[in-house]
Amino acid sequence: MRRWLADTRAGASRFFATPGGRGLRHVAWWLLFVGFEYYVFRGFGQTPVVTWGFVLKDAVATIGSYYFFSEVLLPRVLLRRRWLLTALGLVAIYYFWALCSYACYALLDRYGLISADLYSYAHRFLDGSLWAGVFSWRSVSMGLNDFAVTVVPPILLRFIRFLLRSSNHSLRLERENLHLEVNFLKAQVNPHFLFNTLNNLYMMVVKQDERAPDMVQHLTRLLHYTVFESDAALVPLAREVEFLAAYLQLERLRYGQKVRIDYQQTGPLDAYRVTPLLFFPFVENAFKHGVDSSLDASWVAISLTAADGWLQFEVSNSFSPDAPRREVGGVGIANVQKRLALHYAPQDYQLHLTHDPDAYTYRVTLALRLAPAAAAVPAAASLLPISPIL
C-alpha cells in the first residue's frame, strides 16, 4: 500500500510537470477562485445576473493581471531591477481592474439591474466622466480596498512562490557546489604526484626493495579515502589524519633524504569529527610551491593538536630565495577558505597565511572548532594500518 501511494505521488508529480498537467492545475486553481468569488457575492443578495456579473469582472481582471505579472512584469522587468517600470506595471494592473469594474457597473446600470442597496456603491464610480470614475484620486482611494482583497492576493502568492522556488534553487546549487568542491580537492592528488610515486614504486620493485609493499599500501589508502570515504559532511578526525600521514609517507618516498619532513600529532583524535580534506591542500602546497622550488636544504614541518574541542593545525615550509615570488594561497587554498566559510561559523575557525621573506618561510595556521565523534564507528570502516618509513 505504501509503495502504491509512493508510485501514485511520483506519477502525479511527473504529470503535473508536463505542459498539460500545468494547464490543468491552473484551470483547477481558477475554478476555485471563481467559486470563492461566487460565494462572497452571493451574500450580497442580488439577482444571479448581478452576482455573476461581479464574479466575471473580478475573474477577468484577476486572471489577466496574474498572467501579465507572471509572464511580463516579473521576468522581464522586476528581475532586471527596472524599478520605475515595475511601479508603472503595478499601476497598470490596478487601472485594468478599475476599468473592468467601471465597465461592469456601467453595463448593469444601463439595463437597470443595479438594486437600491448597490446604487450608491456603483454610482460612486459612475457619477461623472470616465476619468472621474476610474483615474481620479477620489475613485482610486475608494477602489484600492476592493483591489487589495481581490487582485493582489493571487499576485502576491505568485511572487512568494517565485521567491521560495528561487531559494530552493539556490540551496540546490549550493549543495552541488559543495559536492563539486570536494571532487575538486580529490582531483588535486595530481597526476604528476601519482606518476612520480608509481615510478618510484616501479624502481623499488625492480630493486626488490623491502619497502615497496608498504608504499603500495599507503598509496592504496590514500586513493581509497579520496574516492570512497570523503563524500560525508563530517569524517572521524583520526581517519583524516591517517590520510594525511599516508600522503606524507609517499612524499618521503618521493624525496628521500633531500627533504626533511617533520610531523607531530597529539590529542584524542578519536573523540572528534571534521570536514574532510581540509588539511590536504595546505600540505600539498608546502611541497608543490616550497620544496619543489629548491631541493637544497628544504624542509616541511607539520603539527596537529586536538584538545578541548579545538584543533590547532600548522604547516610551515622553506622556499628558495631565487624562486619566483607567488601570492600566498593558490586555487586549492582559496577553495578551502570557501569551504570553511560554508561549513563553519566565523567564530568557529581562524585561518592565517603568512609569508616571511627574511626567513624564507611560508606558514599556515588553522584553529578549528571540532564536532564531537559519532556514537560509534564500524571497525570495518577503518583505514589500513600505518607502516612507518624511517
Image (tube, grey):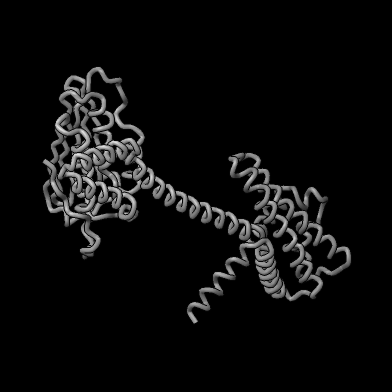
Tell me, yes or no, if residue 243 can be seen here: no
User: Going by the image, does 73 lie left or right of 161?
Assistant: right
Residue 271 lies, in percent from the top left, at 17, 57
Q: In this view, does 136 lie above or below 283?
A: below
Q: Nearer the viewer, residue 240 or 16?
A: 240
Q: How many labels does the image show?
A: 0
User: Going by the image, does 68 lie left or right of 384?
Assistant: right
User: Going by the image, does 157 lie left or right of 184?
Assistant: right
| Residue at x 51% of width, y 56% of height | 164
Residue 25 lies, in percent from the top left, at 65, 66
Residue 99 lies, in percent from the top left, at 77, 54
Q: Which of 341 and 112 is in front in this view?
A: 341
The C terminus: image quadrant = top left
User: Going by the image, does 209 lie left or right of 140?
Assistant: left
Q: Is residue 29 above or below residue 155?
A: below
Tell which residue pokes out farthest to the bottom in this image: 1
Q: Nearer the viewer, residue 124 or 36?
A: 36
Tell which residue pokes out farthest to the right in this image: 111
Residue 319 lies, in percent from the top left, at 22, 25
| Residue at x 33% of width, y 32% of height | 330
Tell which residue pokes out farthest to the top in this image: 322
Tell me, yes or no, if residue 325 can be seen here: yes
| Residue at x 65% of width, y 53% of height | 70
